[in-house]
Amino acid sequence: MSEDAEAPVKSDPSVDWAALYQKHRAAMYGVAYEVLRGSGHVDLAADAVQEAMVSLMKKPPTEIPRSWEALLVATAKRRALDMIRSAAMVRGVELSAEFLPGAAPSDEDEALERLEKMARARPVIARLDQQAHTVFAQYIVLDRPRSDVAAELGVTPARISQIATRVLSEINAAVQGGG
């Protein structure tokens, strides 16, 4: 364990870190999971979220951010990218920035845009019927095998593909159309 990991965490007493974590942990985890998914390290997503929180607690922002969620999500994304780079260095592989998912430096505006798109997608997701919601959650989000989800729902794997295509089209239309 490094000296950094053993040092007590210093934080700004005016920031309720626990409340911020509780409120935004799902978004942070989702971004870290997506970044790590391409490298096959999804098991490190929770670690990326934890490291993001610790780094922010050790060095809180000097100004109040426009959006705490944007700051937390962007920090989790950077920690996940750091983990990919670290794993590549351990294996002795040099990764070009163009091959890392989301490698371009992310700023608060990019994170805010992503949050706006997520906000436009939420009503579509909320209106899904039970079957479509299960396909969305299990097949699309959790990336479970189509055949497993089909067996649970009592439909064919082809039907899972049809439902997934419809759901993704509806979400994409809401996100791209702004409504």
Image (tube, rainbow, N blue to C red):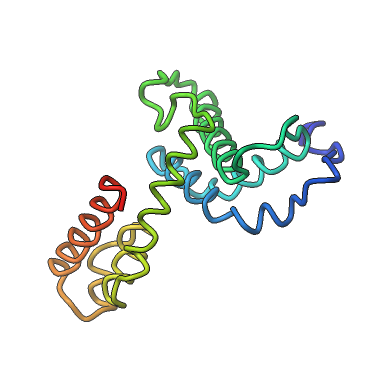
Classify 5 as above or below 21.
above
Classify 91 as above or below 164.
above
Residue 170: percent from left, percent from top:
23, 58
Classify 34 as above or below 101.
below
Question: Residue 52 vs residue 163: left or right?
Answer: right
Residue at horizontal 77 percent and vertical 51 percent from the top: 16
Residue 55: percent from left, percent from top:
71, 36
Residue 134: percent from left, percent from top:
33, 71
Question: Residue 46 vs residue 134: left or right?
Answer: right
Label count reads 0
In front of the other: 108 or 138: 108
In front of the other: 25 or 160: 25
Residue at horizontal 48 percent and vertical 45 percent from the top: 31
In front of the other: 42 or 101: 101
In the rendered image, which quarter is residue 62 located in? top right
In the rendered image, which quarter is residue 5 located in? top right
Residue at horizontal 86 percent and vertical 45 percent from the top: 13
Which quarter shows the N terminus?
top right
The residue lying furthest to the front in this view is 179
In front of the other: 41 or 49: 49
Residue 75: percent from left, percent from top:
59, 36
Classify 177 as above or below 159.
above
Residue at horizontal 44 percent and vertical 24 percent from the top: 104
Question: Residue 160 vs residue 51: left or right?
Answer: left
In the rendered image, which quarter is residue 73 located in? top right
Question: Residue 90 vs residue 99: left or right?
Answer: right
